[in-house]
Image (cartoon, rainbow, N blue to C red):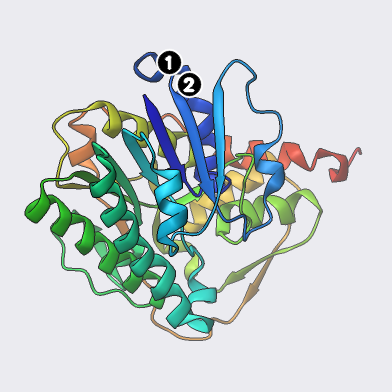
Amino acid sequence: MVILVTGGSGYIGSLLIRKLPLEKEFEGSVIRIFDNMAGDKYFSLFDLPEHVKYEFVLGDLTKPEDLKRALVDVDLVFDLAGITSVPLSFKMSEETKRINVEGARDLLETAISSGVEKIIYSSSAAVYGDVNGFVDESHPCKPSSPYAESKLLAEQLYLEAHRERGLNVAILRLGTVYGFAPGIRFDTVVNRFAFLAAINSPLTVWRGAESSMRPYLYVGDAVKAFILVARRGDTSGSIFNVVTENATLGEVLSAVKEVVPNCSIQYVEPPYRQQVSYGLNYSKIKSLGYEPQGSLTQGVKEVVQKFRAFLSKK
């Protein structure tokens, strides 16, 4: 079997490419990584297991000739590529749409013509927009950023390819990812707070935001969800919410303080009054056998340990 991981140097991809060969179903498979390395995360590819057959295709989602090279003999695709930053998407809205939407369209067309059997698409809980309470996969989507809009449009392309052309696709709407992976990001709250606490810098928190809830996803659980859906034969055309825990910001702060007890918190007035508070209902993927194993404390501990040289020795 040949497995393609687009965005394989990224946060989730860098862990997925290491975990896939450990699964019995994928043992002996070729793991092909497709990435344009725009994020300069070359370090994500350091020290891959030597007993695994890895291949790397340097290319861009929006270049059909690159996709054709990447998809030769591929059976299974994990599509994790694209622009993933909400703030960046406001600055680069057209580019975000070009890469995330047109790139998805090009990938799907090339995958179908290349005989790919299954694609699993990495989407985001951001597609729901500014909602409150718990939402399941049937909840109306009202994206509030160019990034979220692009993910929802790409989802629609995937579902259309399933309905009209019979392609086996599954979509995972992920919560905010945290915890250590070789391609870790620090632009999300848990990892950012863990880093700041480790270097003895105060955590800046909006006053009154501690009760606001968000869906958080341990990176190891994200990888498990992708592998679970890849193994299953009954997920075609389905969307799944994926989360480790729905937690308040106060619970995130408690996890950080549990790992770094002397960390300081600095409260500031919020720039606006309305604060979204929501969680994901993930009973659908749990019915497939998904059981999250991570925790906020575990994720914070993993990140803080990477900066242990800065921790107080007193």
Quadrant of the drawing holding the C terminus: top right
- Farthest residue toward the right? 314
Residue 292 sits in quarter: top left
Amino acid found under the numbered disc labelled 2:
Pro
Q: Residues within 10 Å of mark 1 (few under 14, many from 20)?
A: few
Left or right: where does residue 118 sit relative to residue 211?
left
Mark carried by residue 115: none
Residue that carries the numbered disc 2 in the rendered image: 21
Question: Which residue is painted at 65% across and 36% down in the image?
Answer: 302
Question: Which residue is painted at 25% across and 62% down in the image?
Answer: 133
Specify whether residue 197 is in view: yes
Q: Nearer the viewer, residue 299 or 275?
A: 299
Q: Position of residue 152 (x, y in %)?
A: 27, 66
Lower position in the chain sequence, tag 2 or tag 1: 2
Callout 1: SS? loop
Left or right: where does residue 125 sit relative to residue 223?
left
Callout 2: SS? helix
Whole-number angstrom distance, CA of label 2 to CA of label 1: 5 Å
- Farthest residue toward the bottom? 272
Q: Position of residue 124 (x, y in %)?
A: 36, 58
Q: Nearer the viewer, residue 254 or 168?
A: 168
Mark carried by residue 27: 1
Residue 105 sits in quarter: bottom left
Question: Which residue is painted at 48% across and 30% down in the image?
Answer: 31
The answer to whether marks 2 and 1 mark residues whose Cβ atoms lie closer than 8 Å is yes
Residue 89 vertical position relative to residue 228 in the rendered view, above or below: below
